[in-house]
Image (cartoon, grey):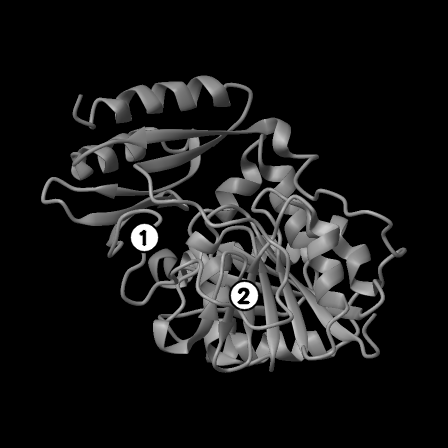
């Protein structure tokens, strides 16, 4: 058991709100000292290869002293291992996009941890609309209400009016919680605000957990997920068209696919916008600037799942509402038409 406590910061926000981007900056900057960042999926984290000291199936160690580990179904085992380490200054845990961070609050007083604040990302382009959505408003509202710091993302695309409406809606729920608006690619002020909140006491947790709760379980009933396999070169423009046509029924989509020229690209739907960016390599393989699972990891690693082998490209779709399953099936059928038979 650790002889010193370290702050545990919970990183929350609805699907596509920018949590991963903030996590990337936390890891790359070293703003929180020697920090461990617990994420839901390694594949979402884009770590500069120059910062990687070693990597394995469950842990990536960086040259600045930070580590990144992927959470498993056994949350207690992962968090317990981090709590027991004396060589960390800080732990940041990503909460599922449909999870309520307050349900993980008890971990902040687990032996080895102390409260380090709850940071919630909100997308300036869609948060107001999400708060009016009868199927997802409850979880978005719960996330905002739990915040010790609100980070408004995608501000440039939303404009001054979108930012103002988002901040007003958030303050109506969270009161006078600090709000940090991210403009452009400058996250410096946001990292300073995160560090400041982490130094404060944070909200007290009720008890020490005997076993972890799943913060997404209460809201998973209104969300459904479907993975669509996309084999061979595909019509990427057609995929973008399908995703756009099924928004807002689809609240999130992400995948790596091969375009007609044979290049691998990442396709995402987040906050109502569809983006396509170079992926650099096929799913499961290493690429410049990416992490190659299976390399040696130094002692003191954290338990996690084994790495996945290279396989065909796929797109993961998430929909919300009572007709979520039907919406996913319709979108999947149209996407299948963009893949060669």
Residue 179, quarter of picture:
bottom right
Q: Residues within 10 Å of mark 1 (few under 14, many from 20)?
A: some
Note whether residue 146 is visible. Answer: no
Q: Position of residue 136 (x, y in %)?
A: 58, 36
Residue at x 55% of width, y 60% of height: 167
Residue 143, position as x, y percentages in the image: 65, 50
Q: Residue at x 69, y 52 (%)?
A: 101
Quadrant housing the N terminus: bottom right
Give the mark, 2 or 1, whose residue is nearer the N terminus: 2
Place of residue 93 in the rendered image (x, y in percent of width and height, measured from the top left)? 63, 60
Which residue position is annotated with label 1? Answer: 285
Examine the rendered structure and indicate whether residue 25 appears above or below residue 128.
below
Residues at marks 2 and 1, CA–CA distance in whole angstroms: 19 Å
Residue placed most toward the observer, 172 or 203: 203
Could you tell me how many numbered marks the image carries?
A: 2
Query: Is residue 69 at least partly visible in the picture?
Result: yes
Please give left or right for residue 180 compared with residue 110 in the image. Answer: left
Reply above or below: 137 against 180: above
Residue 68, numbered label:
2
Which one is in front, 146 or 264? 264
Q: Looking at the figure, which quarter contains the C terminus?
A: top left
The 10 Å Cα crowd at callout 2, few under 14, some 14 to 19, many 20 or more, is many
Task: Tell me the number on the disc at residue 18.
Answer: none
Residue at point 44%, 17% (across, down) = 326
Please tell me whether mark 2 sits on a helix, a strand or a loop: strand
Q: Position of residue 322 (x, y in %)?
A: 55, 20
Residue at the spot 50% in from the left edge and 51% down from the top edge: 41
As helix, strand or loop, the secondary structure at mark 1 comes to loop
Furthest-left residue in this view: 261
In the figure, residue 108 lies in which quadrant? Answer: bottom right
């Amino acid at each position: 058991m650790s002889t010193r406590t370290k702050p545990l910061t919970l990183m929350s926000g609805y699907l596509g709100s920018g949590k991963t981007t903030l996590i990337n900056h936390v890891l790359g900057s070293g703003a929180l000292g020697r920090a461990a960042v617990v994420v839901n999926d390694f594949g979402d984290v884009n770590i500069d290869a120059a910062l990687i000291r070693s990597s394995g199936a469950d842990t990536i160690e960086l040259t600045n002293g930070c580590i990144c580990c992927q959470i498993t179904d056994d949350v207690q085992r992962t968090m317990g291992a981090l709590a027991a380490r004396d060589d960390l200054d800080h732990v940041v845990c990503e909460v599922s996009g449909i999870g309520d961070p307050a349900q993980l609050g008890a971990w902040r007083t687990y032996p080895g941890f102390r409260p380090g604040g709850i940071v919630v990302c909100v997308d300036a382009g869609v948060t107001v609309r999400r708060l009016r959505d009868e199927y997802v408003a409850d979880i978005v509202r719960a996330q905002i209400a739990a915040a010790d710091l609100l980070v408004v993302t995608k501000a440039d695309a939303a404009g001054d009016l979108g930012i103002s409406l988002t901040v007003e809606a958030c303050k109506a729920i969270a009161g006078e919680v600090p709000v940090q608006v991210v403009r452009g690619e400058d996250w410096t002020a946001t990292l300073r605000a995160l560090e400041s909140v982490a130094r404060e006491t944070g909200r007290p947790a009720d008890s020490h957990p005997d076993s972890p709760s799943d913060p997404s379980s209460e809201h998973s009933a209104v969300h459904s997920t479907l993975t669509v396999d996309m084999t061979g070169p595909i019509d990427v423009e057609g995929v973008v068209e399908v995703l756009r046509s099924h928004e807002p029924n689809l609240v999130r989509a992400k995948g790596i696919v091969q375009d007609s020229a044979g290049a691998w690209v990442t396709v995402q739907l987040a906050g109502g916008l569809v983006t396509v960016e170079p992926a650099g390599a096929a799913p499961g393989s290493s690429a410049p600037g990416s992490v190659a699972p299976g390399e040696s990891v130094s002692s003191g690693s954290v338990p996690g799942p084994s790495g996945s082998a290279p396989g065909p490209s796929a797109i993961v779709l998430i929909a919300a509402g009572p007709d979520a399953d039907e919406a996913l099936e319709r979108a999947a059928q149209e996407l299948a038409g963009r893949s060669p038979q």
